[in-house]
Amino acid sequence: MSATMVKDEILNYSDDEEDNFSDDGDWGDWKADDSGVGVGGGGDEEEDDDGSESDFLCLFCDSHYTSCDSLFEHCCLSHGFDFRGIRKELKLDFYSSFKLINYIRSQVAENKCWSWRIEADDFKNVKFPWDEEKYLKPFSQEDSLLYSFADDEEDEEEDTFDRDEVMEDLQKLGDLSIDVEALGETSMSNSDKRNINGTKDVTLLSNCNGLKEQSSADDLIVNGKDAEPKVCDGRLVNRNIRKVNENYFGSYSSFGIHKEMLSDKVRTEAYRDALMKNPTLLSGSVVMDVGCGTGILSLFAAKAGASRVVAVEASEKMAKVATKIAKDNKVFNDNEHNGVLEVAHSMVEELDKSIQIEPHSVDVLVSEWMGYCLLYESMLSSVLYARDRWLKPGGAILPDTATMYVAGFGKGATSLPFWEDVYGFDMSSIGKEIIEDTARLPIVDVIEERDLVTQPALLQTFDLATMKPDEVDFTATATLEPIESEAKTRLCHGVVLWFDTGFTDRFCKENPTVLSTSPYTPPTHWAQTVLTFQEPITMAPASLLTGDDRRGDIGTEELPASSIHLRVSVARSYEHRSIDVSLEATGLSSKGQKRRWPIQIFNL
C-alpha cells in the first residue's frame, strides 16, 4: 500500500517574521553574544568552535540559524513540523532522512502544500513520497542541513516501533496547512484536508479563518502583491490559547487600563443609565456581569435593587480587587456579609466549577465586552456562551444591539499635514513613508468629523439576543458617497470604522440609551479604527461630474470617483483574541465605470 499525497497549488510562499518567535514569547532564533548583541536569523553568521561557518536555512521559510537544534526547534514551534520526532518514529535512516529534507525543500520551492491520508493498516509497507531516488540529489548544493542533521544522534539507541505514536507524528506532518490570509476560500480544498482517520480536521488554519467568501477579483492580490501564504500547524492555535488567555486577562490586572475605562464618561454613564434608570428591569433580578473588572457594573446593578449579582472575572488579581471593593461598599455576599454581590474568579465558560448557579437562572446579563473595531479581543463569544448557558428564556442582555459603521477620511486625518511644514521645512517624504506603512497596519486613533470626506454608511448589525456565535465573523458591503454639501474634489485616504451599542427599549423600557464611538460624538477610549488605502482615491459628488466628458483612470484627478463600493470582512484571526480585517475598494464613475483596487488585509 502507499501513502497517498494530496497536493494543492498555492500562491507565492513566504513566512511572517513573527514565526521567528518561540512559543513562550522569547526571541526564538536569537541569542546574545558576549557583548550582549543579538545574533540570529538574517544577521551575521556565527562561527562554530572549529572556526567553520555554519548557516542552516529553515525548511519552510527564509529564517537562518546557526545550529540544527535551533532550526528544528523553530520548525517545531512555528511550523508544527517535528523532524527528529518523525525520523525517530518512522525509523528513517540517514539516507531516508536525507531524502525527506530534499523532498520538503522541493515542495516548498514549488509552492505546494500537502496533507496525509494513510490507506494502509501495515505501516511497514507504507511507501513514502520521498522514497524516490531523485531525492538523494541535494535540492540545494549549499544546504548545510543535509550534512549536519544526524551529528548528535549517531550514538542514540533505536526506540521500539509504536503504531499510535507514528500515527500522531504522521498527523503532525499532515496538519501542515496554508493560511492564505485573504478574503477567499484558500486554494486548498477543505474536503481534501483530512486527518489520518479520514475525518475533517477542523483545527487547520485554513478552516478556522473566518474570511470565507471568495473575492470578486479574478486574481487574488493582497496588499498590492500576490497573497503570501504561510505554513502553520493548526494545533499550535489550540496550544497557545491558554497562554494568550493568561496574557489577555493579565493585561487587565493593570489599574491604569481600569482608570482609563472608568474615566470614559460615554462608556461608564451609558451602562450606569441602563442599569440604574430601568427599575422594572433590575428590581429583584438576578444579574450576571461577565468580565467585571473593578466591578463597577455589578455595583450599579446592586444599587439598582438586584436580588443577586454574580460578577465573573478571569483575572485573579482583579477578582480580588472587585471582592475588596464590594466589601468596602457593603454589597458583598458571603457567610460574613449580607449583601447581594458575589465575585467568581473564573472564565465564564468554567463558571459552574466556581460557584453554585443553575443553568438559565439569570434575569439580566450585562457585559462591557467591546474591543477596538468592536470585535477585537473576541470577548463576544464568551458573552454569547453565558447567554446560552445562564440567561433565562426571554431574559435581558445589555447591551442588546451592536452596529458597525464606516466612512471615508481625508488628508486631515493623516499625519501628512504635520510633515509638510515642520518649522518651515518640508518633511513630507517622512509622511509619505508613514502612509505606506499604515496601508498595512490598522491604526486606532480619534478621527474628527471635519476630517471625513464621505457620508457614513451602515456596515453590519448584531442582535445580541438572538445572534449565533459564528455570526461574529462576517462579510458586508457598503457604498461611500461624497458629502454633497462640499461640491468639490477631495482625496479619500482610507476608511474609518466605529460602532454603537444599544440598550434598546426591548429591555430598557423606561430609559433606553446608546453608547456611541462615532466621530460625530464625544471621543471614547475605543477611538476609531483607521484603515488606509494604498493610494488615495479622488472623489467628487456626482452632481459636480454630470455632463463632463472626462477620461483617465477612475479615482484620479482626471476622473474622480462619484462613489466607492466597499467589501469588508471581519473575522477572528488564527491568533487567539485577534481579528483580521480585509478591505476591497471599487471606485465608480458618474457614468457607471468601475475600477477595483487590490485587496488589503489588516490584522488587529
Image (cartoon, rainbow, N blue to C red):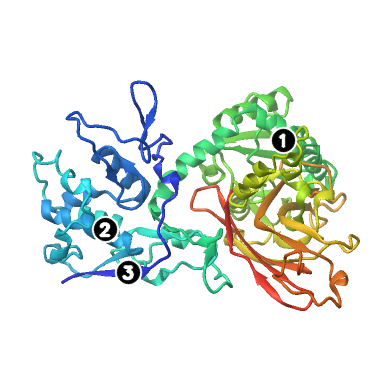
Quadrant position of residue 163: bottom left
486 vs 449, nearest the viewer: 486
The crowd level at tag 3 (other Cα within 10 Å; few <14, some 14-19, many 20+) is: some
**Residue bearing the label numbered 3:** 7
561 lies above or below 26:
below
Q: Residue at x 25, y 32 (%)?
A: 47
173 vs 105, nearest the viewer: 105
366 vs 255, nearest the viewer: 255
Q: Residue at x 40, y 35 (%)?
A: 27
The crowd level at tag 1 (other Cα within 10 Å; few <14, some 14-19, many 20+) is: some
Q: Position of residue 171 (x, y in %)?
A: 29, 58
Q: Please state the total of marks drawn on the protein image.
A: 3
Q: Position of residue 536 (x, y in %)?
A: 70, 58
Q: Amino acid at mark 3?
A: Lys
Q: Position of residue 141 (x, y in %)?
A: 20, 53
Q: Position of residue 76 (x, y in %)?
A: 31, 46
Quadrant (top left/top right/bottom left/bottom right) for the N terminus: bottom left
**Residue bearing the label numbered 1:** 261
Residue 520 visible, this orientation: no
Q: Secondary structure at mark 1?
A: helix
**Residue bearing the label numbered 2:** 104
Q: Amino acid at mark 1?
A: Met
Q: Residue at x 23, y 60 (%)?
A: 103
Q: Residue at x 74, y 42 (%)?
A: 420
The single residue placed furthest to the front in the displayed view is 425
| Gap between marks 3 and 1 measured at Cα | 50 Å
Q: Amino acid at mark 2?
A: Ile
